[in-house]
């Protein structure tokens, strides 16, 4: 269900680089954006669906099916609103009170996490963070752009907005105006919640199981990362078969222990996984949370890769390696084998 993409915008970046006093960001220019994506907690999604899905169906009927929510059984879902900005903001204004009630921080207070292309994050943050500070002051919001992209080698980052409902909507309108003037650079790879593994949620702005909205936000501390509370494994322990349709099974797993898995690849493909100057393997290590060691070539001209980590993290690492090989256009079904 989570299958949309941001459209490519062709506006100049000059207006975005203007000073913080430019509060009316060329609103007369029509936006080419037709999709608005938000990362929401599973509990918020359940609240939006309502009893027997009646509330969600009512919204879809009212807005002619311009709303969708991914239904992967993980602690976070993707909410997608389609159409022009006015329509999307109207839908959002109807949804936010339900989210606020579910989050139960205080009346009229809500947290919303918008998904933006990573190449546009700098325009939202501004030079030395001046624009994100402007949002905080102008709309009286707690605002933050999380440093990491969402899991699964995607190009989406999370902008978190916490505050009063009307201020959230007004701030988003200004954010989207900035994005409309900031062309996307590079590929577009949207987040699929089936890639969720519960690791580094504080880095990318994800949700844990039973997420506590009332807890005071703390800045990310790399020496105290919040880890997963469940085990999100693919049915076949092979994420490569269909990255767009693979679904994760959720089961409770208390006190999992690190394990070691070894996979073998042809030496000719090792560069696809290592990447220029080791950038790709470093990214895989960071996203999966695993220790990954690549041995020297064997006489057979194969290389053994040792992956050390929690079982679900190892599956994530294997998937990311397979994705790296796929993107090199040298993929075969047996390229990475256990």
Image (tube, helix red, strand yellow):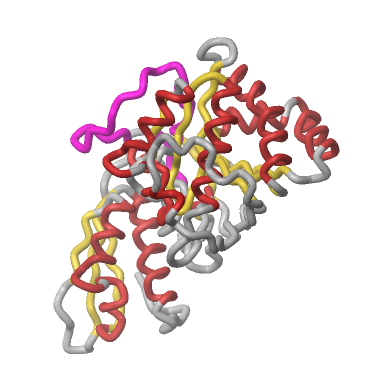
Is 16 situated above or below 61? Answer: below
Residue placed at 41% from the left, 56% from the top?
A: 119
Residue situated in front as seen by the camera: 311 or 29: 29
Residue 300 appears in which quarter of the rendering? bottom left
Is 6 situated above or below 253? Answer: below
Q: Furthest residue to the left?
A: 296
Give the x, y percent position of residue 188. Answer: 50, 62
Give the x, y percent position of residue 133. Answer: 36, 31
Q: Is residue 203 magenta?
A: no
Residue placed at 23% from the left, 64% from the top?
A: 306
| Residue 259 left/right relative to 168 | left
Residue 186 appears in which quarter of the rendering? bottom left
Residue placed at 54% from the left, 17% from the top?
A: 109
Range of residues picked out in magenta? 207-232
| Residue 131 left/right relative to 252 | left
Give the x, y percent position of residue 68. Answer: 69, 44
Q: Furthest residue to the top?
A: 107
Residue situated in front as seen by the camera: 21 or 45: 21
Q: Is residue 223 magenta?
A: yes
Give the x, y percent position of residue 199. Answer: 35, 43
Q: Main secondary structure of the magenta part?
A: loop
Residue 228 appears in which quarter of the rendering? top left
Camera sees residue 1: no
């Amino acid at each position: 269900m989570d299958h949309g993409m941001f459209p490519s915008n062709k506006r100049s970046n000059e207006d975005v680089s203007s000073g913080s006093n430019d509060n009316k960001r060329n609103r007369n220019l029509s936006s080419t954006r037709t999709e608005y994506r938000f990362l929401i907690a599973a509990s918020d999604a359940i609240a939006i669906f309502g009893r027997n899905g009646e509330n969600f169906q009512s919204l879809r009927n009212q807005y002619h099916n311009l709303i969708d929510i991914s239904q992967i059984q993980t602690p976070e879902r993707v909410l997608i609103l389609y159409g022009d900005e006015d329509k999307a903001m109207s839908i959002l204004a109807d949804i936010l009170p339900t989210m606020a009630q579910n989050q139960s921080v205080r009346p009229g207070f809500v947290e919303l996490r918008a998904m933006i292309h990573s190449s546009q994050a700098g325009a939202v943050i501004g030079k030395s963070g001046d624009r994100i500070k402007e949002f905080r002051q102008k709309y009286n919001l707690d605002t933050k752009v999380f440093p990491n992209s969402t899991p699964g080698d995607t190009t989406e980052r999370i902008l978190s907005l916490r505050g009063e409902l009307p201020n959230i909507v007004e701030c988003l309108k200004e954010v989207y105006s900035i994005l409309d003037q900031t062309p996307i650079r590079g590929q577009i790879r949207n987040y699929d919640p089936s890639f969720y593994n519960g690791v580094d949620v504080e880095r990318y702005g994800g949700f844990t199981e039973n997420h506590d909205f009332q807890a005071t936000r703390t800045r990310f501390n790399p020496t105290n990362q919040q880890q997963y509370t469940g085990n999100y494994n693919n049915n076949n322990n092979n994420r490569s078969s269909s990255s767009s349709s693979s679904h994760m099974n959720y089961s409770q797993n208390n006190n999992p222990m690190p394990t070691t898995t070894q996979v073998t690849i042809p030496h000719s493909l090792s560069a696809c996984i290592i990447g220029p100057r080791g950038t790709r393997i470093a990214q895989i290590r960071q996203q999966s949370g695993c220790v990954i060691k690549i041995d020297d070539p064997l006489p057979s001209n194969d290389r053994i890769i040792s992956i050390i980590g929690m079982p679900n993290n190892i599956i994530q690492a294997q998937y990311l390696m397979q994705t790296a090989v796929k993107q090199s256009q040298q993929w075969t079904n047996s390229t990475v084998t256990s």
